[in-house]
Amino acid sequence: MANPKVASREEWLEARKALLVHEKEETRLRDRNAAERLALPWVKIDKTYTFDTPTGRKTLDQLFDGRSQLVVYHFMLPPEWEAGCPGCSFLVDHLDGTLPHLNHHDVTLIAVSRAPLDKVAAYKARMGWKFPWVSSFGGEFNYDFGLSFTPETIAAGATYNFEPASPDSGEAPGMSSFFKDETGQVFHTYSSYGRGGEELIGTYMILDRAPLGRNESGNMGDWMRRHDEYEDAEPAKACHAEAIPA
């Protein structure tokens, strides 16, 4: 980063007010996008999806846990990995504190991964997370919602972030939302991929307001680690990051 300009308080105030105009534009644009998001049409889910949970096998409608809204974070942890995606881990580090607020606002938040439940549970315990996390192992949920890919599904026209998936696609992150009505019918209301979940990462929102910003070269992997892999953190519990593909 180039040396910053050092100015008088009056010059700083003038520049800050100019930035405020753009920040207010961003706020209004965010509000507009939120309204358009709510206005999206819904798609009825007719297919039966099942998941392994700590309390037994459950269908998608049972994951709502008595609420009408369900938000799913598609966490990158396929069966062959021994630990979860570092980027997904970075994001979900910010979720536990939201749970009581979401639950009391008629929203259930969960994570879903393709790894078997025992592997999901082991990594969750290692990281100390509390949010619900279930396994779609052996099912088609992740494939149908555009998060997991095989050469066959890519050849058949699979998409990621609403564009054709690249030939080397395997596992990807995202978020999906669902609604269950009074008759028990479930509807898919929203999905986002790529950087779509970035606003959930409170660390980034704070860094954006720090003097040096994110201070990275466009890749969070330049600096970010799983929270138990920083030099001053306790060693990971028998889990090896090098086993995870880059």
Image (spheres, rainbow, N blue to C red):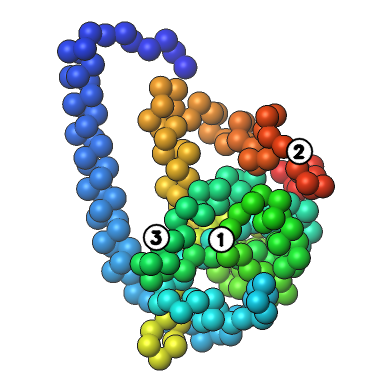
Answer above or below: position of 7 versus 224.
above
Answer above or below: position of 90 versus 216.
below
- Pick the residue in front: 123 or 176: 123
Identify which amino acid the numbered label 2 is placed on.
Pro
Q: CA distance from mark 3 to mark 2?
A: 32 Å
Answer above or below: position of 145 versus 160.
below
- Pick the residue in front: 206 or 125: 125
Q: Position of residue 194 (x, y in %)?
A: 51, 51
Per the image, label 1 sits on a secondary structure element best described as loop
- Pick the residue in front: 219 or 205: 205
- Contact check, label 2 and label 1, Cβ < 8 Å: no
> Would residue 111 be visible to someone looking at this image?
yes
Please report whichever mark, 3 or 2, sits nearer to the chain's N-terminal start. 3
Read off the residue under disc 3.
101
> Would residue 168 be visible to someone looking at this image?
no
Answer above or below: position of 217 versus 83.
above
Q: Position of residue 237 (x, y in %)?
A: 78, 46
Total labels: the figure holds: 3
Give the residue displayed 25% in from the left and 53% down from the top. Answer: 31
Give the residue displayed 56% in from the left and 85% down from the top. Answer: 47
Residues packed near mark 2 inside 10 Å, few (<14), some (14 to 19) or many (20 plus): few
Q: CA distance from mark 2 to mark 1?
A: 22 Å
Left or right, 144 with reference to 66: right
Mark number, residue 235:
2
Q: CA distance from mark 3 to mark 1?
A: 13 Å
Q: Position of residue 69 (x, y in %)?
A: 41, 73
Mark number, residue 131:
1
Please report whichever mark, 3 or 1, sits nearer to the chain's N-terminal start. 3
Q: Position of residue 128 (x, y in %)?
A: 64, 51
Give the residue displayed 17% in from the left and 13% down from the top. Answer: 10
Give the residue displayed 68% in from the left and 29% down from the top. Answer: 232
Please report whichever mark, 2 or 1, sits nearer to the chain's N-terminal start. 1
